[in-house]
Image: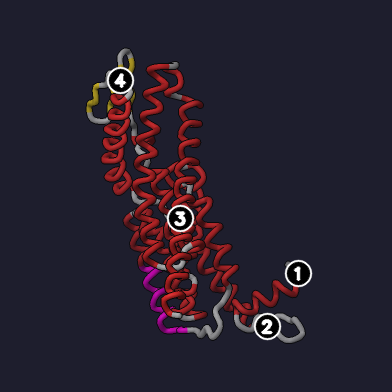
């Protein structure tokens, strides 16, 4: 990107940041810089903790992909034609975001505190470019919101049913292969071995990642809202079934090959390989849905003629 290109893009974002000769207009840049500083003071620490969770917390690792994609997509989409600021509404949203940030900080509620970052960005967008720009950037805002990890209370409530579901599916598949199995909750007992389907093996990570990717793929590849919602709904059973297959494969390898294959590096590698399988299944579903959309479009054209 050349300096002239960068100035042109920055001019669109900040209003009249540069004059016709390329000289900086400080009447625009100073308020813009003050806004950035205030944003960093209010939300910088919160964003730092969020980024740290993306890096160290496996449950939040999808944020490392989603957050940069959201920024890139907003930059790629640019500012819509005819964008007009709505100062009063933008200030109201910003004040509400700051109040939410402060209240969540006092209560030490991380999810709400981190979500206030997205809300503040919505307020800044409305202030400078209006509500229609928020609708124009719906994908970056949705993807950014999905990059915020769910509260621990919610993840624990979701993980336990998923653990039981994966245990039941894995045990049923093992029985189909004539493997003697005794299922007790999330514990699969094999002759001489016990498999514990822990919270890390519940499939919640892959479920969160697949739902996030289905939102992204649906926005990029599909045209109709119905198809996009359907893709998200299909991603859920894909994640659940593949995780059940993972439990089955672990039990199968432990029973027939080597108990060491149920732990350590091999177990992690197996999980990654099956996650790639789930991504492939999701890609196949997207391809089929694009074909169906194309067929429906051609059918509508024929009927209109």
- Residue at 34% across, 46% down: 237
Membership of 91 in magenta stretch: yes
Q: How far apart are marks 3 and 4 (CA)?
A: 36 Å
> What range is drawn magenta here?
86-99
| Disc nearest the viewer among 2 and 3 | 3
The residue where tag 4 is placed is 178
Judging from the image, what secondary structure is the residue with disc 3 in?
helix
Q: Nearer the viewer, mark 2 or mark 1?
A: 1
> Does any portion of residue 49 appear in the rendered image?
no
Q: Indicate which label's residue lies in the foreground, 1 or 4.
A: 4
- Tag count in the figure? 4
Read off the residue under disc 3.
288
In three-dimensional space, the C-alpha distance between marks 4 and 2, rounded to whole angstroms, equals 77 Å
Q: How far apart are marks 2 and 3 (CA)?
A: 52 Å
Q: Where is residue 65 in the image (x, y as percent from the top left)?
A: 53, 52
Color theme of the render = secondary structure
């Amino acid at each position: 990107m050349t300096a002239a290109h960068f100035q042109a893009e920055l001019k669109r974002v900040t209003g009249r940041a540069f004059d016709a000769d390329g000289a900086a207009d400080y009447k625009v840049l100073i308020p813009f810089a003050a806004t950035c500083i205030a944003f960093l003071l209010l939300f910088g620490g919160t964003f730092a903790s969020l980024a740290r969770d993306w890096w160290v917390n496996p449950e939040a690792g999808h944020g490392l992909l989603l957050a940069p994609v959201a920024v890139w997509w907003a930059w790629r989409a640019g500012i819509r034609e005819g964008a007009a600021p709505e100062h009063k509404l933008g200030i109201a949203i910003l004040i509400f975001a700051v109040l939410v940030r402060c209240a969540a900080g006092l209560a030490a509620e991380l999810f709400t505190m981190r979500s206030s970052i997205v809300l503040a960005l919505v307020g800044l967008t409305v202030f400078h470019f209006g509500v229609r720009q928020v609708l124009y950037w719906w994908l970056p805002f949705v993807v950014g919101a999905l990059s915020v990890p769910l509260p621990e209370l919610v993840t624990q409530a979701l993980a336990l049913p998923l653990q039981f579901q994966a245990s039941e599916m894995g045990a049923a598949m093992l029985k189909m292969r004539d493997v003697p199995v005794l299922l007790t909750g999330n514990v699969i007992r094999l002759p001489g071995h016990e498999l514990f389907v822990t919270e890390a093996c519940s499939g919640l990570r892959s479920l969160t990642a697949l739902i996030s990717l289905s939102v992204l793929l649906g926005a990029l590849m599909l045209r109709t809202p119905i198809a996009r919602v359907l893709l998200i709904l299909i991603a859920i059973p894909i994640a659940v079934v593949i995780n059940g297959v993972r439990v089955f494969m672990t039990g199968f390898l432990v029973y027939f090959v080597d108990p060491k294959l149920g732990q350590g590096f091999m177990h992690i590698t197996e999980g990654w390989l099956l996650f790639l399988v789930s991504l492939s299944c999701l890609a196949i579903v997207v391809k089929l849905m694009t074909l169906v959309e194309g067929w429906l479009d051609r059918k509508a054209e024929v009927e209109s003629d």
